[in-house]
Image: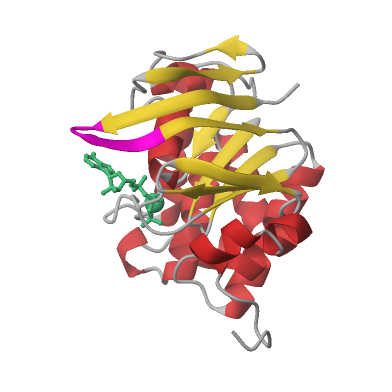
Amino acid sequence: MPLLDAKEVSVRFGGHMALLDVTMSVEPGRITGLIGPNGAGKTTLFNVMTGLQDPVRGRVLMNGIDVTGSPPHERSQRGMARTFQRLELFGSLTAYENLQVAAEIKRMWGGGTSVPADERVESAIELIGMRPFVHKRADVLTTGQARLVELGRALVTRPKVLLLDEPASGLDADETEYFGTILKGLAKAGMGILIVEHDVPLVMKLCSQIFVLDFGQMIASGPPAAIQGNQRVIEAYLGAPAGSGA
Ligand SMILES: Nc1ncnc2c1ncn2[C@@H]1O[C@H](COP(=O)(O)OP(=O)(O)OP(=O)(O)O)[C@@H](O)[C@H]1O
Ligand SMILES: [Mg+2]
């Protein structure tokens, strides 16, 4: 059973349908990709899944249980965590304190884990390799370090399903590679990961299943090879493959 399902989700902003009958799912132990042009509705779909945006139609299920209309903290209790497209760290706190705050909020919200907050913080720091900058203030970190802290804040909640909105944005090639290795390790350990990312080679490398949004509609889904060869996806987003002469 999928960890997370969106079923025929529609979102309206005024007269504009930001999402129209969108269906997708996130499986445990896999990295699932969500791609599409700017403004396609990817972040809006994240917001619907995490409870920040009410759909006008459709449902969100976690482990088959309908959570549509339930607030973000209830979804967190059921094991959902996310990161944000625009970094949302507390700039005047250290990297360590940013993780502590997230772990403490999770403790107050409850659910999911009996592991003490301090232990969750320490193991996230180890897992991500945050030790060298853990006592720096968040507002002096490089983008690469800040993106790792953002991931760490999600991981201290011990999520079963993790939603990442453009986690590689602003990272160089080495940082992107490192980030990908961490995500693969998390999936191998059973986590379901949904990644929105414009770094197409990264998505193709990491994901076993990819969904493609365009103008609020799901225009394709499938494994990387099928998506790369899908004419509609090429026209909407990927462009012609290098060397095709187009
Ligand atoms: N709160 C809002 N109020 C009104 N319109 C919105 C709101 N949030 C998003 N939109 C519009 O909905 C559409 C989808 O936006 P969304 O941010 O979900 O796209 P996206 O796929 O995440 O794009 P990007 O790749 O640039 O992050 C866009 O047309 C956007 O302008
Ligand atoms: Mg977005």
Position of the N terminus by quadrant: top right
In the rendered image, residue 99, in percent from the top left (x then y), is placed at 47, 44
The correct choice, above or below, for 116 with respect to 219 in the image is: above
The correct choice, above or below, for 33 with respect to 132 in the image is: above
User: Can residue 32 be seen in this snapshot?
Assistant: no
* Residue that appears at 34% across and 22% down: 54
Q: In this orientation, which residue lies closer to the viewer: 33 or 94? A: 33
Color theme of the render: secondary structure
Give the image quarter of residue 80.
Answer: top right
The correct choice, above or below, for 81 with respect to 215 in the image is: above
User: Can residue 145 be seen in this snapshot?
Assistant: yes
* 168 relative to 3 in the view: left or right: left
* 53 relative to 163 in the view: left or right: left
* 184 relative to 169 in the view: left or right: right
Residue reaching furthest to the left: 14
Q: Is 17 within the magenta?
A: yes
The correct choice, above or below, for 172 with respect to 73 in the image is: below
* Residue that appears at 52% across and 34% down: 81
Q: In this orientation, which residue lies closer to the viewer: 133 or 209? A: 209
Q: In this orientation, which residue lies closer to the viewer: 9 or 1? A: 9
Main SS, magenta region, reads strand
* Residue that appears at 35% across and 53% down: 39
In the rendered image, residue 237, in percent from the top left (x then y), is placed at 51, 63
In the rendered image, residue 114, in percent from the top left (x then y), is placed at 64, 20
* Residue that appears at 46% across and 66% down: 169
Residue reaching furthest to the top: 65
In the rendered image, residue 63, in percent from the top left (x then y), is placed at 67, 17
In this picture, which residue range is highlighted in magenta? 13-19
Q: Is 48 within the magenta?
A: no
